Amino acid sequence: MTVAASLSITAHPEGVLARMKVLWARPVVDVSGVKHAFRWLTTHRFVMQPGRQTITVYFERKDSMGGHATTQLDVGPGETVFVIATLRGRDAFELEVRRDPPDPLLTNRAI
């Protein structure tokens, strides 16, 4: 029996142009081909298989998408990987991958 791993992800905008995206766009995370839409400024947790994973974060609007950022990582059974996706400017996510939980008091989460 394989023990599942998990992905904990938070997306937040940084800067005036990125904050405007929050009004019309929704963040999406693609975990090795499985897509999950989630909300800005809220931490979401998704189950994934252990092993090599490709994580892509982007945003979707009514008729388009953008801001793609991709990373690959190896995840062990029962491990939780924390990703902070920061939308900077108009169209570019930056991903911070951590193996330990981020300190919520130090994370910039304000709109």
Image (cartoon, rainbow, N blue to C red):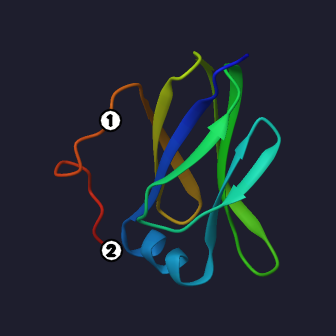
Q: Residue at x 64, y 27 (%)?
A: 4
Residue 25 occupies quadrant: bottom right
- The CA distance from mark 2 to mark 1 is 22 Å
* Residue 97 visible, this angle: yes
Three-letter amino acid code at the position of disc 1:
Pro
Residue 30's spot in the image, x, y percent?
Answer: 72, 46
Query: Which of the two discs, 2 and 1, labels the residue nearer the N terminus?
Result: 1
| 89 relative position to 53: left or right | left
Q: Height in image: 42 above or below 3?
A: below
Residue 8's spot in the image, x, y percent?
Answer: 49, 43
| 75 relative position to 1: left or right | left
Q: Quadrant of the N terminus?
A: top right
Residue 61's spot in the image, x, y percent?
Answer: 71, 76
Residue that mark 1 sits on: 101
Residue 6 numbered mark, or none? none
Crowd class of label 1 (few under 14; some 14 to 19; many from 20; radius 10 Å): few
Three-letter amino acid code at the position of disc 2:
Ile
Q: Quadrant of the C terminus?
A: bottom left
Q: Which one is in front, 107 or 78? A: 78
Residue 14 occupies quadrant: bottom left
Q: Residue at x 70, y 18 (%)?
A: 2
Q: Residue at x 54, y 66 (%)?
A: 90
Residue that protrudes farthest toward the left in the picture:
105
| 30 relative position to 47: left or right | right
Residue 87's spot in the image, x, y percent?
Answer: 48, 58
* Residue 68 visible, this angle: no
Mark 2 or 1: in front is 1
Q: Which one is in front, 29 or 13? A: 29
Q: Height in image: 3 above or below 65?
A: above
Residue that mark 2 sits on: 111
Q: Height in image: 64 above or below 71?
A: below
- Label tally: 2
